[in-house]
Image: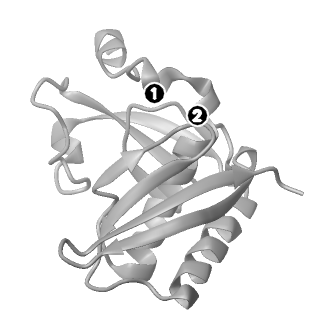
Amino acid sequence: MEANIIINQASPKFQDVSIAPMHTCEHIVNQTMIRLFGCERSVSAHIERKKSKLDYILPHCPTEEDIKKLEDTVNAVIKLQLPVTTEFITQEEAYGRFDLKRLPESASQTVRVVKIGNYDECLCIGTHVNNASEIGSFKIISQDWDESSKRWRIRFKLLPTL
């Protein structure tokens, strides 16, 4: 098992603890998008310490009301102070439970699952906070829609919790 844990370590970029709050927030945003819009997790993500962006494929551009609901829901989940935990399972156990399309062919037979309380769980190699309370407040700073690809991009940052 120890060899598999080493294989499943976060890549150097994702070991940067300064992005742990932002990366953990990405998980919450992804699950909230699934619940509110019925879409899949983001198709593209650029996670940085100061601001990040996520792309989703949707049938239509979200309204201002949808955007506010997304922001409010993510912040409500953060306020629940859910624990962030990890477990290791086999790829066979992950099959049917998780989308394995993004798993590289070179991945070990043991994969890492990151859970945020009972709100979200997914395969991940990134560094995360120990508790959602460490994230701060989620704020969408801009968004744009590409009609031809049906791609919705949000840019967001984290603010200190008051």
Q: Which mark is residue 26?
A: none
Q: How many marks?
A: 2
- Residue 26 position within the rendered picture, expressed as x and y whole percent measured from the top left: 50, 52
Image quarter in which the C terminus is found = bottom right
For residue 137, side relative to residue 62 (left or right):
right
For residue 72, side relative to residue 9 (left or right):
right
Image quarter in which the N terminus is found = top left
* Residue furthest out toward the left: 105
**Circle 1: is it few (<14), some (14-19), or many (20+) Cα within 10 Å?**
some
What scheme was used to colour the molecule? one colour
Disc 2 vs disc 1: Cβ atoms closer than 8 Å?
A: yes
Q: Circle 1 sits on which residue?
A: 14
* Residue drawn where x is 81% and y is 50% of the image: 160
- Under mark 1, the amino acid is Phe
Q: Circle 2 sits on which residue?
A: 19
- Residue 36 position within the rendered picture, expressed as x and y whole percent measured from the top left: 45, 80
* Residue drawn where x is 53% and y is 38% of the image: 48
Q: Is residue 42 above or below residue 57?
A: above
Cα distance in 3D space between marks 2 and 1: 8 Å
**Circle 2: is it few (<14), some (14-19), or many (20+) Cα within 10 Å?**
many
* Residue drawn where x is 52% and y is 62% of the image: 119
User: SS for tag 2?
Assistant: helix
- Residue 143 position within the rendered picture, expressed as x and y whole percent measured from the top left: 48, 69
For residue 96, side relative to residue 54 (left or right):
left
| Label located before the other in sequence (2 or 1) | 1
User: SS for tag 1?
Assistant: helix
- Under mark 2, the amino acid is Ile
Judging depth in this view, the residue of 73 and 114 nearest the camera is 73
Q: Is residue 57 above or below residue 53?
A: below
* Residue drawn where x is 18% and y is 47% of the image: 100
- Residue 81 position within the rendered picture, expressed as x and y whole percent measured from the top left: 73, 55
The quadrant holding residue 4 is: top left
